[in-house]
Image (cartoon, rainbow, N blue to C red):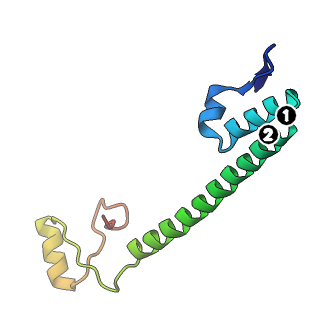
Amino acid sequence: MGWVDFTGLFRSHWLLRALVPGQVAWDNALTAFENGEYGSGAAYLAAMLGEQALTAYMAKAFSIYESEICSAANSVPKRTKLYRAVSEAEFKQINRTEKFEAGPNSLGGNFCWRS
């Protein structure tokens, strides 16, 4: 996943550094520890943990926000008006029974989906 070069610089793969929260701080911490700079290494470790905690907090906050939006969008009123083009035979059947029923070759029902 990573490598150490002869100058003592630790660098993870560029994709990890771009996508993983705290990865750059982790690389800097390892470099500092390898160079004997323990105070700087500890500071970088703290920065890494802070980035990860902030990312987790923001992900949770967003998921709560998203679930509120989804629950509001999925609330369905008791009655919904649907409009559909029907054949003459279906129109007569709807007027006769006042129901939307399955006709021949309809796979057992008329299917509608909210948009």
The picture places residue 23, in percent across and down from the top left corner, at: 69, 38
Q: Are there few (<14), some (14-19), or many (20+) residues within 10 Å of tag 2?
A: some
Give the quadrant of residue 10.
top right
Disc 1 is placed on an element classified as: loop
Q: Is residue 71 above or below residue 18?
A: below
Label of residue 40 in the image? 2
Give the quadrant of residue 36.
top right
Q: Are there few (<14), some (14-19), or many (20+) residues within 10 Å of tag 1?
A: few
- Seen at 30% across and 64% down, the residue is 115
Label 1 sits on residue: 37
Amino acid type of disc 1? Answer: Glu
Amino acid type of disc 2? Answer: Ser
- Seen at 49% across and 68% down, the residue is 65
Disc 2 is placed on an element classified as: helix
**Mark 1 → mark 2, Cα distance in angstroms:** 6 Å
Query: Mark 1 near mark 2, Cβ–Cβ under 8 Å?
Result: yes
- Seen at 82% across and 44% down, the residue is 42
Q: Nearer the viewer, residue 72 or 7?
A: 7
